[in-house]
Each structure stands twice: as C-alpha cells, then as structure tokens.
Image (cartoon, grey):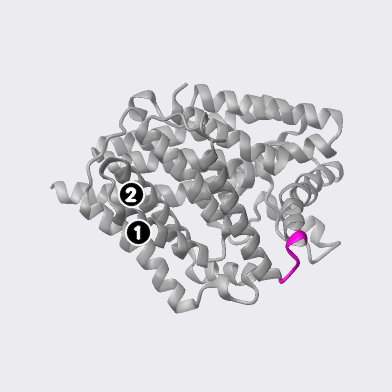
Amino acid sequence: MNSFSNLSVSIFLFFSLIFYGIAIFLFGDFLLILNCLFFIIICSLILNFYPPYSKNLIKINVINEDKTFNIILFLLGPTSLFLALILFSPPLLSEKPELDRVIFADRLGVFDRIITTANYFFIIYNVCLFTLDKKKTRIILILLTIILMLLTGFRSRVMDVLFISFLTYSYTRKINLVKTFFSLRILVLGALFFILLVFITKIRTQSDIILVILSIFERIFLINYEVNISRILKYTTNNEFMYGYGYINDFKSVFSSTTLSMQQIVTSHFNKINSEIFVMTPTQFGEAYLNFGYFTNVFYPFILFLFTFLIRFFTNLIYLANHKGLLVVFLIYSTYFLVRSAPTLGISSYFITKLIPGFLVATLFMILIYITKK
C-alpha cells in the first residue's frame, strides 16, 4: 500500500467517521451500528485493493511545466472567479453568507462547478510543480486562489484545498504523510485552520466564541445525524426502500428539472411537516441504506466498483492523450473527491457535482492537446 493510497483511504475513514460514523455509533441501535461499521470497513478495503487508478498510472509523478496549460487553468479558475466576485460581490462579506453563497452559485449556473473544478486543477498542478522547482510565486498564486475561494462563502472548499494539497504533496514526493499527520507542524496548521473557521463563524453569527465552537461541533456531529441519517431512517420506516433506483433517479435528475433526486425526495417528504427543513446531504451510507436497507453491504460494493472503474477508464483516456500534467491533476482530483465527497454528500452527488465537471474540464484540455498536436 503506497503513501498515496494510504493517505486517500485515511481521508475516507476520517470523513466517514466525522460525518456519519461517530453519530451512528453514539445514537444508532445495535444493528445500525453493526451495518455502518461493516460498511466503512468494506468501502475502505475496496478503495485499498481496487482504487480509482491503476498501478502504472500512480507511478507517473514527475511532470514538467506546460505554461500554456497552466495559463489556461489560471484564466478558467482564479481569473474567472475573481471576475464573478466583482460582478456579484463576495458572499462571505454579506450579511447572510449562507444564503448569498447559494444565490452566487445559482447565478453562475453550470459555470460555478466548472470554475471551481478549474481552481482545484490549478492548485493541484502548482503544488506538484512547487515540490519540484520551489518557486515562491506558485505559493503566492495558490494562496490568492484560496482567498478567492474563501470569499465565495463555502468554507468546505478551503478545507478541501488543505487535504488535496496533502494528497498532492504525498503523491509527488512519495512521502507517507499518514505517519506525520499528527506531527507538530500539522497540528499547528490544523489549529490555525480551526481558529480561522471559528473566526469566520463568529463574524457571521455575531455569537460568543464558546457558543460558536459548540455550534461547530453540533453541526458536524449532531445535526448531520438528525438531518440526514435520522430522516432516512424515518423515511424508510414509512416508505419502501428504493432498491437501487435512487441512483438511477439521481442521474436522470441532471437532465430533467421535474425529476427529484434522492435527497430532494426525502426532504420533500418532511417539508410537508416542517417547511423550514433544508435539503439534506444523505452521505454515502445514508443513500446506500435508503436504497438497500440492511442489505447495504451486499449491494453497495457493486456501486462503488462501478465508479472506481469509470474513473479508471477516464484516466486511461487521458493517459492516451500523453499529457502527464493533466493526468496527474485529474488522478489526484478524482481520487480525493471520491474519498471526501462520497462520505459527506453521497456518491451520486460526487458524480454530479465533482466528477462530471472534472470530466468536462479534462475533456476540454484533451481536445486542446489534440488540436495543437495536429
């Protein structure tokens, strides 16, 4: 198990425990706890022994700078986001950033996901290059990009940048960062990030620091369980399971405004009682249970195998395009968001909000590579 695989599985375990595992272990009944425990173990084993990349691709970790590629990434990512923030004003600086960030994303439409994906591509690429050439200008550009992403009001995107940078650094330097994850440097960086999170939340809510800290922990553990897992358990008690159709329905919802996704179906069921309840994020375990119940661990591995195969297939297409930079960037991007977004949002949301935009951006560059080589 190489350092890249080691860290990616560790990230999966971290988010699985944080977003649903610990809450289920604290509040769930014995059968639910047992089902969740085996679910996390089985998914971890699949990601370890059949990761979303083949061994011959993971060995490609030395890349040379393609300035044209980097400039286009910069224009598509940080520059486009900067112009969007000027045009619509930064959601973070508004009085209601939680609402305004959604409005901001809606105004950009599909370009919000494209621009966000390009920003991640830009950061991954420049972290890779920095480990090789140590140019300080790359760090400055990365920090400016992080600030722009922070101004959108989506705090999770900054967290993603930190984790994806660890994964990128581990990949390019072949360093097992899991062993140093709890080193003094990492603990200090983690503490600084948490302080930044508390500071932003305090400004937004204008609450006491103690209340802010308690609200953060409540949102991470209690609310994720009450709003997501608990609602799915209640829904499946009153209705039948989706028997795998939920995943097909999520894919159909991308192309139809009248087709509701899994989380929208469950949310609308409870909205009849309480109209203030917001759209849920089912988590990987939640959507699997919604479809298969206590047979989750029998059927869900096929879903996970399908997605890892799909990513492998696409990375092999990029490999044929013969652009190591694009290959490394997409490999890290798709792997990271599989082990991060699937546990927190669900694998369907990962496919819709992360993988499809990643496919689009990567395809754009493959077309450009093909045109320039003609």
Residue 271, percent from left and from top: 80, 61
* Crowd band around label 1 with a 10 angstrom C-alpha radius: few (<14), some (14–19), many (20+): some
Name the foreground residue: 92 vs 315. Answer: 92
Residue 169 to residue 297: above or below: below
Residue 313 to residue 101: above or below: above
Residue 136, percent from left and from top: 30, 53
Residue, x 47% and y 21% (percent of image)? 1
* Kind of residue at disc 2: Asn
Whether residue 287 is visible:
no
Residue 179 lies in magenta, yes or no? no
Residue, x 44% and y 52% (percent of image)? 357
Q: Which residue is mark 1?
A: 141
With 270 as the anchor, is 51 left or right in this view?
left
Name the foreground residue: 211 vs 98. Answer: 211
Task: Label 2, secondary structure: give it.
Answer: helix
Name the foreground residue: 192 vs 82. Answer: 192
Name the foreground residue: 115 vs 169. Answer: 169
Distance CA(mark 2)–CA(mark 1): 9 Å
Residue contact between numbered discs 2 and 1, judged by CB atoms under 8 Å: yes
Residue 167, percent from left and from top: 45, 38
Residue 112, percent from left and from top: 47, 63
* Kind of residue at disc 1: Leu
Type of secondary structure dominating the magenta stretch: loop
Q: Which residue is mark 2?
A: 126
The region drawn magenta spans: 206-210
Task: Label 1, secondary structure: give it.
Answer: helix
With 260 as the anchor, is 88 left or right in this view?
left
Residue, x 44% and y 24% (percent of image)? 2
* Crowd band around label 2 with a 10 angstrom C-alpha radius: few (<14), some (14–19), many (20+): many
Q: How many marks?
A: 2
Label located before the other in sequence (2 or 1): 2
Whether residue 236 is visible:
yes
